[in-house]
Image: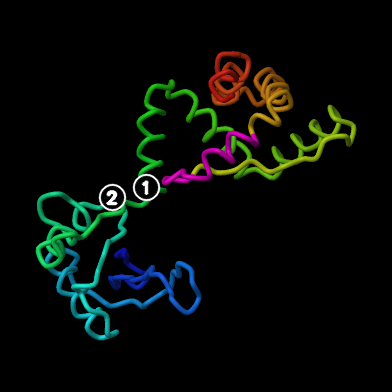
Amino acid sequence: VDESTDVSIVKFMCFCVRYHSKNKSTIVTDFLGIAEVTKTTAKDLYDCTKEFLQEVGLQLNKLIGIGTDGASNLCGKNNSLYTLLKEDVLALQLIPCVCHSLHLCSSKAALELPSSIEFLLQQTRSWFTSSPLRQSEYKLLFKTLNDGDKKFHQLVQLSKTRWLAFSAAIDKILEQWVELKGYFSIVARGEEKSYMAKTLSSKYNDDCNLLYLI
């Protein structure tokens, strides 16, 4: 289950079900549906869930587990959808979202890295996004340095959730490290005289940053 708000600012609760199918002799995951909710407190989501299960003909006492993200109103240990459902189903199991759990682990680990690493990833892409001229100049340098032997890939923007985008952004920076290092070294000494270009040039000339990314 998960709750979300759409572009029209309407709140919804989404339900999927995972069960063992005797007919198919396998575990099946299926979309049950969505229900509109006014509030997203634990009690409101609990009432919504019970009403929805009744509408689709599923018995609450046969519920084995509930899978959620890390939101406190869904799986908090004191007052959540999970704790309220557990009062009805004493053996109810909580299965936290693997993606959210891994994200929390990686976020904690990333705190041990210098903040300059994320700065490098964000600002490198930002440097090119608003300027077609910068993009074309860099592509020309890339092509010249590689003489067509290496394929050019666009840089990847970091995502706030960063489950997949962080890794993809790092990969694209690493495969173009030499080219980006050369480009910003040229720009930092050029007519543009940009403080950001000089800052990025210093980051690319620091081999410690390369080791952190690797």
Secondary structure at numbered mark 1:
helix
Relative to 22, 53 lies left or right: left
Residue sitting at x 9%, y 63% = 87
Which of the marked residues, 2 or 1, is nearer the chain's N terminus? 2
Mark 2 and mark 1 residues within 8 Å of each other at the beta carbon: yes
Q: Residues within 10 Å of mark 1 (few under 14, many from 20)?
A: some
Magenta region: 159-172
- Queried whether the magenta region covers residue 15, the answer comes back as no
Q: Quadrant of residue 149?
A: top right
Residue 190 bears which disc, if any?
none
Residue 82 percent across, percent down from the top left: 19, 59
- The question of residue 161 being in magenta is answered with yes
Quadrant showing the C terminus:
top right
Give x and y (percent) for residue 69. 31, 54
Q: How many marks?
A: 2
- Hey, which quadrant is residue 29 in on the image? bottom left
Q: Which residue is drawn at 60% across and 20% down?
A: 210
The answer to whether 196 is drawn above or below residue 207 in the figure is below
Label 2 element class: loop
Q: Could you tell me residue 135's position as x and y percent?
A: 71, 40
The amino acid at mark 2 is Gly
User: What colour-coding does the image apply?
Assistant: rainbow
Looking at numbered disc 1 in the image, what kind of residue is underneath it? His
Q: 164 and 196: which one is in front?
A: 164
Mark 1 sits on what residue? 100
Q: Where is residue 42 in the image (x, y as percent from the top left)?
A: 15, 62
Residue 70: which disc? 2
